[in-house]
Image: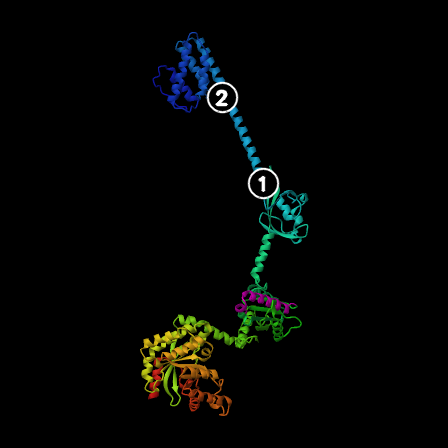
Amino acid sequence: MPAQPVADTGDQDPLVPVWLRVVASTAYVPRSSTEVRALLRGLLGRLTDALAAEPFDAASGAVVGELMVDGALTGELTLERSIGVLADGLVAAGHDARAVVRLLAGVSAGYAAALRKRTLRQQENMKLALLTAKQRAERDRRDTENRFRGVFTASAIGIAITEPDGRFVETNPALANILGCAADELADRSLSDFLAEDDAEGRPLGPEADRRRLRRPNGDTAWVYLTTTMLPADDGRQRYRVTMVQDLSELQLLGNQLSHQNLHDALTGLANRLHFESRLEAMHGQAPPGGALTLLCLDLDAFSLVNTTHGHHAGDRLLQTVARRLSSVVADRAALVARIGGDEFAVLIAHGPVVPSVSELVGEFNAELAEPDYDGRRGLAVSATFGAVRCTPEEMSSTEMFRAADAALRHARSTGRCQWTEYDAHADRAARKVAAAATALPAAWENGELAVVYEPVVRLADRRTVRVRALVHTTSTRDGVDTATELAELTGLAVALGPWLVEQSTPGLPVWRSLFAPVADPGEAVHRVLLSASQSADADLSGTLNRAIDQAGVPAGLLEVGLDTTTVLARGDAQDNLRTLGDIGVVTALHGFTGGPREIALVERFGVRTVVLADPFEGWRPDWLPSEAVPVRATLALISELGSVGAAVGVLGVRDLAEARWWADQGVRTGEGPAFGGPGDTDDILARIRLAAN
């Protein structure tokens, strides 16, 4: 109870309030004033009862003293002032002074005894608490030490506790295993004794993970991560070092394997395309001034036949054989062999004092590849087609070299199998121009940049336009040549472009019917479409034509459809299309016709109505050739034979009227080309015909 004024509450004994004020001013009692007042009233009652008892017993005073301690009336001056107040009050109340003194002496004695007992009890409790805390701390220390020892001993990471100079104080078994020696051999040694020579005098060990190379006593090396921290002593100074050593041997091996797999072909073990390009760039950059490199790209001829005939296992075996043999040819040269695709390889050779020609190199490779590889009784071998480039680093970058060799390979493939070609910059520029136009065509079609135009088809006898040929128009269209379709054939877009051309052009059939029917022969078509090779074999061609004719609402015989002759000869589905078109009433034609016996038999067999000749003179003007020239006589004979089986003959690319007259004199029925005007839209064709009529 905090010290505070206490008002008289009307106690029967006026000594209680006086004692309460003394207690309140000298002691903090954790009770309410009412509880303290009741305590004092009870104590005072014990004292007065003891003074009134017969015989007098001073022992009650000792009990009151003990109760004062138990009641926390233990302020520094509480006993002294309480004795004074009680002595005055009890004597004033008429009690015997001697008895009061003896009684209050007992109070003091009891107070002192109780206070001593409480102090001893508190000391005992403190001793017990200290002992318990010490025992707990010791147990925790042992547990911590055991845990540390367990981690230290069982850790897969090497741990070394060393002096500041690096000498080992304590090491765990993992460190001995990493260092490749017994634990007892590490005494008085340091980690720097095991660092490889190139790391021994390098950067000091620090707190950050540091990749270092160790050399074991048996001579083996190992890569490790080292991390070092300092341990303070009891006085706070840095006394020991703790170094963690993580063995990277397995990670290094795995990394090497992954690196090798990333840079090498899994089947053949050769460098892959990524590694080859990197090495090409490095060898290109390291070549001395004027030092040349030869790069050959090759692919195996008809390799797919091996897979389809003998299975992929045989194909894989053959690829491994090819890899070994290519490598053996350049084994004594500064060269790199790589597999850059399925059956494509590349060979890079840095020139030495003696450099064979490209033809000699190709001959060596083909000679090696021609030897069959026997798997039991079966011997397999393949030939290869090569593209080559030979230049100095000043002439081409490494990227340009790779592209040039690949371009040469593509050109060699276009000439046949088992061929080789050295890079030709002029031919490459032309091929790239065509390739750029071909790859741009799908986007032009998607963006609506293609349109249908019409080429006049003229009856050569009187030079009257009797029909038109529908063409796909682009900005690259040359006079008389449907280059969009040719480009589409390179990219595979031609299959979709064929139906589009038919659907876009046939709505004009009624216009051409009204325009050309009066001047054309009976039963003659007024609209021509010549299809490319892939379009000629389109499985849905007849369905496309039927839909287009139905929508136009005109007879099928007004439409003439020409198929590619070579495709019809080679593919049964194209022959089916030729037969079906005749069955539905479309006028059938063959273009790209060269006049072989099989082609003439094809015209007769399928009742082809029109044959459009390929250029039999390879760009020469026929009207300039003598009549006894073999090409002229052969062409005349062909025209005669075609007429005998009921086929009309047409020609493309007529240059001028003189050439047109020559063809007309030979019995050719129709022609088209610059002599009769270039392609135009419907309005342009109508304007030309009106002008010619006037």
Whole-number angstrom distance, CA of label 2 to CA of label 1:
47 Å
Which of the colour schemes (rainbow, by chain, secondary structure, one colour) is used? Answer: rainbow
Numbered marks: total: 2
Return the x and y of residue 561 as percentages of the image width and height: 39, 79
Tell me if mark 1 has few (under 14), some (14-19) or many (20+) residues whose alpha carbon lies within 10 angstroms of its own: few
**Residue at position x 57%, y 59% from top?**
259
* Closer to the camera in the image, 628 or 330: 628
Amino acid type assigned to the residue bearing label 1 in the image: Gly
Residue at the (52%, 26%) spot, across then down: 126
Q: Which residue is mark 1?
A: 150
Q: Earlier in the sequence, mark 2 or mark 1?
A: 2
Query: In which quarter of the view is residue 516 placed?
Result: bottom left
Q: Is residue 669 left or right of residue 286?
A: left
Q: Main secondary structure of the magenta part?
A: helix
Quadrant in the picture for residue 17: top left
Between 533 and 661, the residue placed more toward the observer is 533
- In screen coordinates, is 342 left or right of 218? left
One can see residue 479 in this view: no
Helix, strand or loop at mark 2: helix
Q: Position of residue 543 (x, y in %)?
A: 37, 74
Quadrant holding the C terminus: bottom left
Q: Give the residue furthest to the top.
A: 55
Q: Is residue 351 visible?
A: yes
The furthest residue to the front: 377
Q: Which residues are magenta?
A: 306-331
Circle 2 is placed at which residue position? 118
Query: Which amino acid type is marked by label 2?
Result: Arg
Q: Is residue 319 above or below residue 529?
A: above
Residue 131 lies, in percent from the top left, at: 55, 28
